[in-house]
Image (cartoon, rainbow, N blue to C red):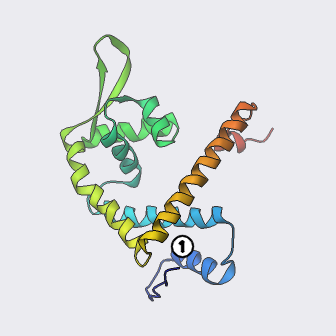
Amino acid sequence: MAKQKKVTVEADATTRAILEHWDHIKPNDRIAHLVRDLARGFTRSLQTRLADHGVSFGHWIFLRAMWHKDGVTQRDLAVQVGLTEPTTHTAITKMVELGYVSRRRKAGNLKKQYIFLTKEGRELENKLVPLAQDVNKVALEGIDDETQKIVRNSLLTMIHNLAVDEALSLADGKKIPSTRSLGIRS
């Protein structure tokens, strides 16, 4: 196992709480909590870098997906990034205002609107992807290649296992409720 580099830095309350939890309170807490805090750390680290370019993390998610597959419907984009259609609609509307994407209809299909990157949206890829690569580099510092391979394979296995579990639950008629519906008392 790679040795952790201990560095003393001035951290905000959220970061201090996370570090306190893992260093002292519950260092052997569930993997789900560990992964959640790890994901939060990745997100916050990338957010600080994206802010230098005036791009929100929410827009990054959609841009990243569209750099891989452009010209998709709003519904397809929502599915691709794992967010709801209303959330996607709000983000895309703002991204149109910012000049990152445009909405267009394809010939022969006047019903559906497709989302396309603009020149500016496409050019952001060369500026922003290195920021994400930098975050990964920071996160993996001090972890040897073999351990990285084990971690990657383990995470991919967990993703697969949870996707199968979700599919089985949905096949049994269970649904993933919206946060809004759970907040309503009967």
* The residue positioned farthest toward the front in the image shown: 146
Instruction: Tell me which corner region of the image, top left, top right, bottom left or bottom right, holds residue 44.
Output: bottom left
Which is nearer the eye, 99 or 36?
36
Could you tell me which residue is drawn at 32 percent across and 30 percent down? 71
Name the residue: 75% across, 30% down. Answer: 173
- Residue 52 in percent (x, y) is at 27, 63
SS under mark 1: helix
Residue occupying the point 44% across, 88% down: 7
Q: Which of 38/116 is in front?
A: 38
Q: Is residue 158 above or below residue 166?
A: below
Apparent side of residue 174 relative to residue 158 in the rendered image (left or right): right
**Number of marks drawn:** 1
Instruction: Please identify the quarter of the rendering in which residue 133 is found.
Output: bottom left
x, y percent for residue 43: 45, 61
**Quick one: label 1, few (<14), some, or many (20+) residues within 10 Å?**
few
Q: Is residue 84 above or below residue 24?
A: above
Relative side of 122 to 84, left or right: left
Residue 51 shows up from this direction:
no
Expressed as whole percent of the image width and height from the top left, the position of residue 146 reads 46, 70
Q: Could one spot residue 77 in this view of the protein?
A: yes
Residue drawn at (23%, 43%), measured in percent from left and top?
122
Q: The disc labelled 1 sits on which kind of residue? A: Thr
Q: Residue furthest right?
A: 186
Relative to residue 129, is residue 4 depicted above or below? below
Quadrant (top left, top right, bottom left, bottom right) of the C terminus: top right
User: In the rendered image, which residue does mark 1 sit on?
Assistant: 14
Residue 120 percent coordinates (x, y): 20, 44
